[in-house]
Image (spheres, rainbow, N blue to C red):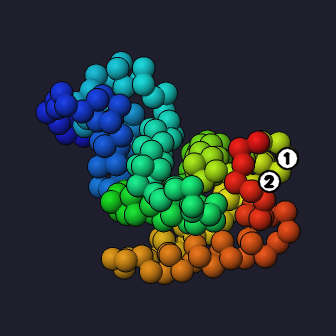
Amino acid sequence: MAEKKPQDKSISARDKIINAALDLAAQGKWELVELSDIAQSAGVEYGDAFELFDEKTDILAAYDRRVNRRAIEAADLGEDTSCREKLFDLLMERFDILNEDRVALLNIMRSFKGDPKEAILSAPHLGKSMSHILGAAGMSTKGISGALRVTGTIGLYLYVVKTWKEDDSADMGKTMAALDKALDKCEMFNNSILNKMPCSRD
């Protein structure tokens, strides 16, 4: 049974639930954690938790939005920075932030192998997440070319995640190298997700 934590009025109920979910994920098998466990650990009434999140995948999506917001705030997105540099900086900022909850996230990823439904439900959230990252980098996600760009970025991100999972170094040198290499490969293909079109939202 999850231990109920004292209320902290300086933190929103949404963030309390996200934080509690990560705490419980870090303790063991994510697939065994119920929304009621998370609400109790967060010190939030179940009814209030249910109003905010229908299920655990919604909590993960909210966590991902929080990560993206922090990454966008921290990244170098100046006008003189190229789209490729912006995308590199945004994704590395994401991995830096994810490292703060590394144990929890690795447990969650492992749980997807035993619960394919949760992995499938999480897939659309990843697409939205990468769309926001591309938008922040100044790259259009409209139309067929935009859809291909989002799809390519998802593939690129998942490829680098494999390296990040094994990279426990303080500077994440292997992750950085994998991301740089992946972006270089994308630039080799004409009309790829990182073609040399101007940074446009159109």
Dividing the picture into quadrants, the one containing residue 105 is bottom left
Determine which of the numbered discs, if any, sits on residue 148 in the image: 2
Give the camera-side residue of 81 and 164: 81
Dividing the picture into quadrants, the one containing residue 28 is bottom left
Seen at 42% across and 25% down, the residue is 52
Above or below, comparing residue 91 to residue 19 in the picture:
below
Seen at 62% across and 43% down, the residue is 128
Dividing the picture into quadrants, the one containing residue 7 is top left
Label 2 close to label 1 by CB (< 8 Å): yes
Q: Indicate the position of residue 12 as horizontal and vertical percent values.
A: 29, 29
- Residue 123 visible at all: no
Left/right placement of residue 1 relative to residue 154 reads left
Q: Give the residue at mark 1.
A: 144
Above or below, comparing residue 158 to residue 34 in the picture:
below
Q: Indicate the position of residue 194 as horizontal and vertical percent values.
A: 73, 64
Determine which of the numbered discs, if any, sits on residue 113 in the image: none
